[in-house]
Image (cartoon, rainbow, N blue to C red):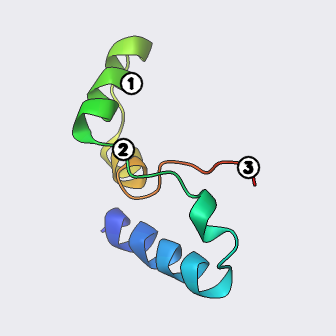
Amino acid sequence: MAKDVWNTILKHVQTISPPIFPTVNPSATEEDIIRLESILNVHVPKPFCEYLSTWNGQREH
């Protein structure tokens, strides 16, 4: 469910703000999330994993 919401938001960003869309980072992989959990020694909740695997932050433009 959360992944669907993040995908919808990302599509809206692409539509209404084309200059900002290219600054969105590529999706985090499962390996990226496992590495994050290992480095921080925490369990990342599923909704946040879904966010990261859809929209892994944004670079400044």
> Of all residues shown, which one is farthest toward the left?
30
Element type where label 3 sits in the image = loop
Horizontal and vertical percent for residue 3? 34, 64
Residue assigned mark 1: 36
- Give whichever of 57, 18 is nearer the camera: 18
- Give whichever of 1, 59 is nearer the camera: 59
As drawn, 35 above or below 51 = above
Disc 2 from disc 3: Cα separation: 18 Å
Q: Nearer the viewer, mark 1 or mark 2?
A: 2
Nearest to N terminus: mark 2 or mark 3: 2
- CB under 8 Å between discs 1 and 2: yes
Residue assigned mark 3: 60
Q: In the visual, does 59 lie left or right of 60?
A: left
Residue assigned mark 2: 28
As drawn, 50 above or below 16 = above
What amino acid type is highlighted by mark number 2? Ala
Disc 1 from disc 3: Cα separation: 22 Å
Nearest to N terminus: mark 1 or mark 3: 1
Dot 3, crowdedness within 10 Å: few (<14), some or many (≥20)? few
